[in-house]
Image: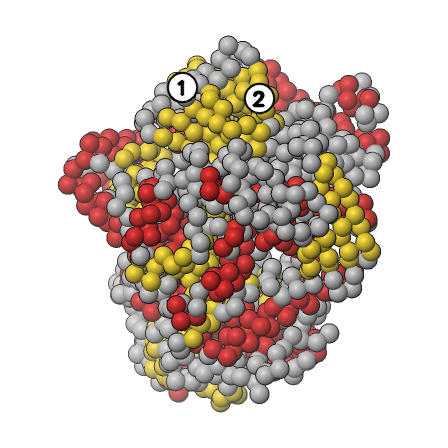
Amino acid sequence: VTAVRPDRQVDPITLEIIQAALQATSDEMFAAFRKTAMSAIIYEVLDMGTGVTDADGNLASSGAGIPAFVGVLDKAVKRLLELHDRSAIGPGDVFATNDPFYGGVTHLNDVVLAMPVFADGRLVAWTANIAHWNDVGGMVPGSISNEARELFQEGLRLPGVKLVDAGEPITPVLEIMRCNSRLPDYLLGDLWAGIAAARVGERRIVELVEKYGRDTFVDAVTAFMDYGEQVARRALAELPHGRFDLAEEQDSGAVYRATIEIGDDVFVVDLRDNPDQDEGPNNASRDGTLIAAQMVFMNLTGAGASANAGHFRPLRLLTRPGSVFDASPPAAFATYYEVMIRLYDLLLRCLAPRLGERLPAGNFASVCGTFIGGRHPDTGRHFTIVEPQVGGWGGSARADGSSAQFSGFHGDTFNCPAEVAEARYGLHVDRLELNPEPGGEGRFRGGKGILLDYRVRSDGCFLTCAYTRDRHRPWGLAGGAEGSSNYVEVIRADGTVERHAVVTALTVNAGDVIRIHTASGGGYGDPRERARERVLDDLRNGLVTAERARSVYGVDAT
Amino acid sequence: VSARARVRAATDVGGTFTDLVYFTLDPETGGQEIVTAKADTTPPDFERGVMDVLRKGDLALAGIAFLAHGTTLVINALTERKGVRTALITTEGFRDVLEIARGNRPDFFNLHYVKPPPFVPRSLRREVGGRLEQTGAERTPVDLTGLPAILEDFRAAGVKAIAICLLHAYANPGHERAVLACVRELGPEFSVVASHQISREWREYERTSTTVLSAYVQPVAERYLNRLDAELRAADFDGQFYVMQSNCGVDSVEKTKAIPITMVESGPSSGFWAAAELGRLIGEPNVVALDIGGTTAKCSLIEGGRVRIHSDYWIERSRLSAGYPIQVPVVDLVEIGSGGGSIAWVDDFGKLHVGPRSAGAVPGPAAYGRGGTEATTTDANLALGRINAEYFCGGELVADLDAVRGALEHVATRLGTGVEEAARGIVRIANGNMINALKLVSVNRGYDPRDFTLLAFGGGGGMHAVDLAAELGIGKVVIPYAADVFSAWGMLMSDLRRDFFHTRLLGLTADNAAALEALLQEVRAASLAQFGAEGIAAADVRFHRYGKLRYENQEHSVEVALPEGEIDAAAVELVAERFHDAYEREYTYRLDAPVELVGAHVVAVAEVGKLEPAPLATTGRTLGEARKAPRAVDFATGGVHEAQVYVGELLEPGMRFGGPAIVESKGSTIVVHPGSTAAVDRYGNVIIAVAGEPETEEVA
């Protein structure tokens, strides 16, 4: 065992203190952003991320929030460095990008703000954040449409432009942004929250460099990344090695394929053999695809570690330009997140049976992005819900899956309390409970999804959603049963029921109920091996019927 | 007036020891005497330890006018899961809220993350029909017809306590009151509590969790307080008896028995209250207070003499777990796993870490010689000579220096360094952890620590304070007299205090001034009625009123003091101005957007005759007489120096000395770095003027 040290030896304790301060900086930016944001999707759903990169855009630390945003910021900064001459980057500047072809990585709703940090006149780091903005223009309210065919239909493109120059906002740019949103007040509030967060981080790093000196600071960042790499390589060496592949049909009928090679020093994800890019918005940029691979890599090698650029060094990604995982202009990206989570789930499913007991069975594995908008019946103002849903997680060799938890795409994300939703959105929340539908039985069963009823109170509201894992359900493992489905029912005031998984701008009126069902996770192991006491417990708790207890688990409670 | 009017005492039940502090006042001279005593904590019958310590302190119970009591009973019952079997009655369609919680996974790369399991299993979570609007208006009437069957099931399942939490009860408790009355009538054997009795804030998961956790510990707390009260009375105590709460105030035993959950953070709260009171006494209204104990360090910011109380409090929450919310008034603090007993360890990649794992009381640091083999912060401080090996734990223990060396060698080997370097590293890492915590309560909230005084207490406060202050650019450090029983002192300084948080959404406009005034009057009337029922006159109650404000559509609010008197249009304008200013200070920008009131925070305070501290008597002793033999001390960040050593108990007001120096008292050590100077003020507090930050070393 050797300590991680750069060639020029600096006291390792000093390096450690700087590294802890880098982490604290990302956390502090996260807290500041969360508290000041205007939109529930940022402050409650925490569809946001913060981070610090080195001068070249390599990720040094990242804040809490959601795993799917951890690897976004470095890619954005790297692209900014390509787009701008160094002489055009100065202290007090803030840049913005949301365009996957300009470092935006995800979709146009996710706006990245990045701020260069200077010390002694030299660029030493970047602080950056990303957040989902409610409306950036485009063809539908909320900017996300399953009907989009081109990026141009999805809103205003911000191609890595400067928003703040040496501390002064560039008003014309802000005016263009404001004027392109249906919710300009939210946009400006969220924008300033992001700028404030980046500035908080900048101040903290300047203080660090002033205290320890630039060379020591740079050494600390370098050593931190080397440490990340060592952690990753150590974990990689302990995984079964080999070449694994899997093809899986999606709800859309498309077949996605992945080949994963695990070696002592490499983790290769090959996605070249995949369909051409989608004509609709079901595409991911290469950067977005890379993040799905990074998430799997962190799941396998990163227990307790901080995600930084060094940690990801052993990871290789192969894609084919023009394919669904490396889409070319002018592809639409609105629902990139379902493509990403499908890929993420595919990679886990590919590995799960081959890695011993390291991975649980499949979970509900859809963001279950739900968009509801219309007129607030009490205030007359326009409201928009933009929210992911919680669902069931898969059983594992050790335990039942958790119920009602956000997907692997999200993380420290919070659902909206019914009491807040009723005030804020002017809908009635008639119920929120565990979904009793069968599925996910096993020695350790999947966790339960939810049933959530929104009763609409004014005419002319809309519902948009894009759920996957409806037709093809969460996968079981080691003989466990597959989970149930993610879908939405619209129960009209007259009693008729419509079933949807993907729908855009469906009109819903006063008295209609939007019933959200999320899936239970897959089961792990043969249900007949489930401990009798656990089955009886589930019976008592109404999580399984007496009939299923008998037929699936072989337990007769009478 | 009999002698008993003059004795004020506080007892504090901790994990290992039960402490007693009492003050006697000589009516002739006005002189005060502080007496302290310690006895073992005696689980599960904690009242025994309390009675023991009162006897040990040689205190005639009949002579006590005021007795304040603090205990970790509630937090222990929660974390050790030693409450009673609890059931929940909630609104139809929402019984799973307690299990669904907020759905978050803080340890987000861990696919095996396990949600914290609910305190009530699904089979004991039952529903009643009826709905309210967020305005409090009734949507459908409450339906009590199912309750007899529900209670029958609860009985069959051995339930002891019942929590009731219905949707929008914060706005209108009517439905909850109906259910509560019915449950009390049908099941008088159950301990019952409804959410509106504890919290009038929105967010059903947080409120349900709060109600459930309170119900879960209620019978345990009630039994304990009843027994303690009975034993005290049997021993002729007939003074006022108060229980320390989490909001920096004390409250009556009766109130605490009904809602024991408000005791959950009583320990830290009395310490931070002590810091605020001491700050007032010595003219330091702006204080960063730091309490370093055996397993954790806690800090809180006091501005203008005011402690911050909020209701966004969680137990067992960390980077690895979502924890459980408790929506009661708690002093706003940051706690980290870094105390004297925190264990230093080196990971597989040669990185040194300190905490959060702690050696606890058993086996304790290696120096205790009780079989501890892992190096702790205390061991590192010993090895560096910062703690006196000859006077370890006030001379009560002989430091096992071989064990210390062995434990540090293990760390040093893994680090590839010498033992001294490893010990310095442990102290520096521990300091680094505490610096980040101190920044969270100061810079992170828009405050510059340089505008504050660092007030450090607890066993380890004086050991690290000067280092931390230097690092943060803080110029002055205060180590209070009797720093190791400072929390108990805080209890003696406490008022009867109740914090009321009421959610009510109102645009902050002149039109709504009357509605805001009505809300404040409503809260005021309710609290006065409560006090009145306990025999406290309205004239003796003072109110402090705050608004929770935000820009429209935001979620998080900023608390702003409301002006005195009736809220009218002009007052609303003033409040808006205060909000914009406070917001900009904290977040660097302001918006030209409508401002919204989310609710009110009303503090009701009734003085219960608190202590007026008197200056410490002097005997004319010289500084030289307080000095011990000097010794070499490694200051970790400031090199090795021959330090003067002083006996804390012999220091007297007016004494001054410079660093390098060490002050050793029975329960704590103060490290004064080279260049810093210390002075003893008239109350016996050690005030240190901190020299500029020491150079950081680089090992070539």
Q: Identify the residue at the far left of this view.
A: B570
The residue shown at (65%, 82%) is B417
The residue shown at (39%, 87%) is B624
Near mark 2 (Cα within 10 A), the count class, few <14, some 14-19 or many ≥20, is some
Query: Which quadrant of the figure has residue B685?
Result: bottom left
Label 1 marks which chain's residue? Answer: A
**Amino acid marked by disc 1:** Asp
Q: Position of residue A425 (x, y in %)?
A: 41, 29
Say which residue label 2 marks: A489
Near mark 1 (Cα within 10 A), the count class, few <14, some 14-19 or many ≥20, is some
Say which residue label 1 marks: A459
> Which residue is at the front of the view, B218 or A157?
A157
Q: Please, is residue A31 above or below residue B563 in the view? A: below
The residue shown at (22%, 44%) is B575
Judge left or right: residue B233 versus residue A279. left
- Visible residue check, residue B330: no
Per the image, label 2 sits on a secondary structure element best described as: strand
Judge left or right: residue A185 versus residue A298. left
**Amino acid marked by disc 2:** Glu
Q: Which callout, 2 or 1, points at the residue further toward the start of the chain?
A: 1
| Pointer 2 and pointer 1 on the same chain | yes
The residue shown at (69%, 55%) is A318
> Which residue is at the front of the view, B605 or A447?
A447
Q: Position of residue A366 (x, y in %)?
A: 62, 37
Q: Position of residue A184 (x, y in %)?
A: 34, 41
Per the image, label 1 sits on a secondary structure element best described as: loop
